[in-house]
Image (tube, rainbow, N blue to C red):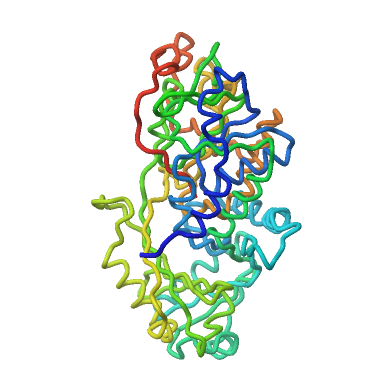
Amino acid sequence: MGTPSLRDKALRDTTVREDAAADDATSGVCYDAAVIGGGVIGHGIAWEAIRSGRSVALIDDAPGSGASWAAAGMLAPVSELHYQEEALLELMIESSRLWPAFAAGLDRGLDTELDAGTGYLTTPTLAVGADAADRRALADLRAVQLAAGLAVEPLTVREARGREPLLSPGISCAFDIPADHQVDPRRLLARMAALLGTQSRSRAVARRAAALLWEDGRVAGVSLAGGGTVRAKETIVANGLGAAGLGGLPAGLTLPLRPVYGDILRLRVPGHLQPLLTSTLRGLVRGVPVYIVPRQDGTVVIGATQREDAPSDPSAVSAGGVYQLLRDAQQLLPAVAELELLEATARARPGTPDNAPLLGRVALPAAGNGAGEQIPGLIIATGFFRHGVLLTPAAAAICRQLLDGMADPRWAGFRPDRFSHLPGPDHHSQETDHPQETDHPQETERSKEAV
């Protein structure tokens, strides 16, 4: 349901001169950076590289059509603190800290009559529970959040309904989370694409990346499906689930990505109910999470389903998921029953075994995991799972540091080779094992961008 007109317009306007970039081997063009993947992560990295004075090629045959298109855009390091995922917290907090300046940089010089900007809002989040068990679960989570130094303040039901009058009087508890904000991923993506389209050093390549291009033991760019190359000093793999199927990955490198599907609904709020909410609402209903995110345009986003099934189509929406979302959202906010359903969307997010991103450079095979020298010319940025939009500024900043020859030791635990058993010094890359991939890239699964 729904027509992605905003995405289509933005990407139609900014996908420029892709034919000219189809084979840089003959033109002699070599970019400072080639970014594979046109989701929010890929666009954010490309934008940061442009800001650093570099030339960039952004490669994706269907930019903005993956998980980024479906994402709700909650910037919620506090709410997203999960048990046994504490290692992610520092990265989430750092990215949350970067968000105001990141959004301001994108919105600078904005003509509000012509462009809606990123949709970044610092409105707070309310966490609410439906019954006594939900109250205990949220109280237990608050204890973990407080132990991590995060601000979560209890509210009475009366106080919560004073702030949000349409909340059900039957909720069991409420907590104020002032540090959790939101952005509109579709507007964010359109804004980044539009800005990149104005830069002479930026080029959008509407082709699928088939394989990494190797020369003299280093990654030298990208081979395109159907022929042609994009040559670059540095190549950043940021195409979400598609990264694992990219040809020419270093020998022994394992990118253990799994698709985690989520259903999300978009609904219009009738005029007599506006504003439906002024805060993002995150709830538990009989132990099942649900969220309602209000937008500036008079719509809301409802989501929180998470499934690892194998649908007949990657974008197939689960009927049970839609029913669950509407049922639980109405229990917390009965007025949801009066909204107009505009769109039901489903996409797969790239998960990893520890639900943390694969972010950084890859060790040379002889050096082993995380030790010694790195494979020159290659950066991996994928596996962001639920946190792609939140972590976009941090991912962009980390990649810029790596492009500058620096590495922040705080993020060493997210190395992309941490699940790999790299071979010995006799095997340096798939360039050695599969030299045909340089000139004749094999067809791989369609690239999809990260979130």
Q: Is residue 131 visible?
A: no
Quadrant containing the N terminus in the rendered view: bottom left
Left or right, 286 with respect to 12, comes to left
Q: How many marks?
A: 0
Q: Identify the residue at image location x=39%, y=14%.
A: 436
Residue 205 on image: x %, y %: 52, 36
Q: Identify the residue at image location x=71%, y=31%.
A: 404
The correct choice, above or below, for 295 with respect to 8 in the image is below
* Quadrant assignment, res 232: top right
The correct choice, above or below, for 382 with respect to 102 in the image is above
Residue 12 on image: x %, y %: 52, 49
Residue 198 on image: x %, y %: 67, 45
Which residue occupies the foreground of this view, 369 or 168?
Answer: 168
The correct choice, above or below, for 385 with respect to 30 in the image is below
Q: Is residue 367 visible?
A: yes
Left or right, 393 with respect to 271, comes to right
Which residue occupies the foreground of this view, 105 or 100?
Answer: 105
Which residue occupies the foreground of this view, 370 or 54?
Answer: 54
Residue 121 on image: x %, y %: 64, 67
Left or right, 77 with respect to 404, comes to left
Which residue occupies the foreground of this view, 48 or 16?
Answer: 16
Q: Identify the residue at image location x=64%, y=52%.
A: 95
* Quadrant assignment, res 196: top right
Name the residue at the top extreme.
426
Q: Identify the residue at image location x=51%, y=36%.
A: 36
